Amino acid sequence: MLPDYHMLMDILKGFLIGICASAPLGPIAILVIQKTLSNGQKAGFLTGLGACFVDTIYAAIAIFALAFAQEFLGAHEVLILIVGGLVVAGMGGAMTFKDPFRKVKEEDSTSYSLRDFLQAVFMGISNPGAILVIFALFAFFGIEPGPQDFSVAPVILAVSAGSASYWFGFSWGFSHLRKNFKFSTLLWISRIAGVIVMIIGIALLAEGIMKVIFL
């Protein structure tokens, strides 16, 4: 049996939600830019897939277990901020002080690994507020999260597909820009991106510490 009109519309909305959830220029986008400029599109896209994985998990939580997620985040907010801040600041520090080109020859600068994917996953999990963005997008597009059966699985997959499509296009665009820069310029872009990510991590850590002090 072919899917009905409402399911097709929900799948399309899920695809758009995946794009919209990925679009803001946050720390993951900066990480994708850095990986793409340093190591090529495959590294950037693999990093983006880490963010896509987190978005897919959050979409599933938004549909099946939003109330539980809100309770968990509220109970562990301080710990998440402190640990997440340390993780993000550490990644930013590595991006700032590490030369990603030291082992890369100018004629072949395309290296990537599972670490790129995992870095984005850890960075995404360290920002659990993203689940609220997913929830808001579900509400905006008229998809009501709540007790559901597994007939909503295509919607969750559509969110994942939208997110993956966005990161593919994002990394593809920056990989073409990469060809117009010298290695010294790319190194400075990488370091500036690292400083931005490190500042975001320090801000998260400071927020967590302030909550410990003043609670």
Image (tube, helix red, strand yellow):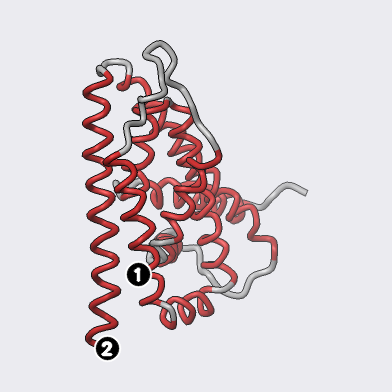
Left or right position of 197 against 161: left
Residue 106, image x, y percentages: 37, 14
Residue 63, image x, y percentages: 56, 67
Q: Nearer the viewer, residue 94 or 204?
A: 94
Residue pictured at 36% horizontal, 25% vertical: 102
Mark 2 or 1 closer to N-term?
Answer: 1
Name the residue tied to disc 1.
82
At label 1, the amino acid type is: Ile
**Distance of label 2 from label 1 (alpha carbons):** 15 Å
Residue pictured at 30% horizontal, 50% vertical: 26
Q: Nearer the viewer, residue 107 or 30?
A: 107
Q: How many marks?
A: 2
Left or right position of 166 against 207: right
At label 2, the amino acid type is: Leu
Badge 2 vs badge 1, beta-carbon distance below 8 Å:
no
**Element assignment for label 1:** helix
Name the residue tied to disc 2.
215
Quadrant holding the C terminus: bottom left
Residue pictured at 51% horizontal, 74% vertical: 66
Q: Nearer the viewer, residue 1 or 188?
A: 188
Residue 197, image x, y percentages: 28, 49
Residue pictured at 29% horizontal, 82% vertical: 212
Left or right position of 201 against 41: left
The outermost residue toward the right is: 1
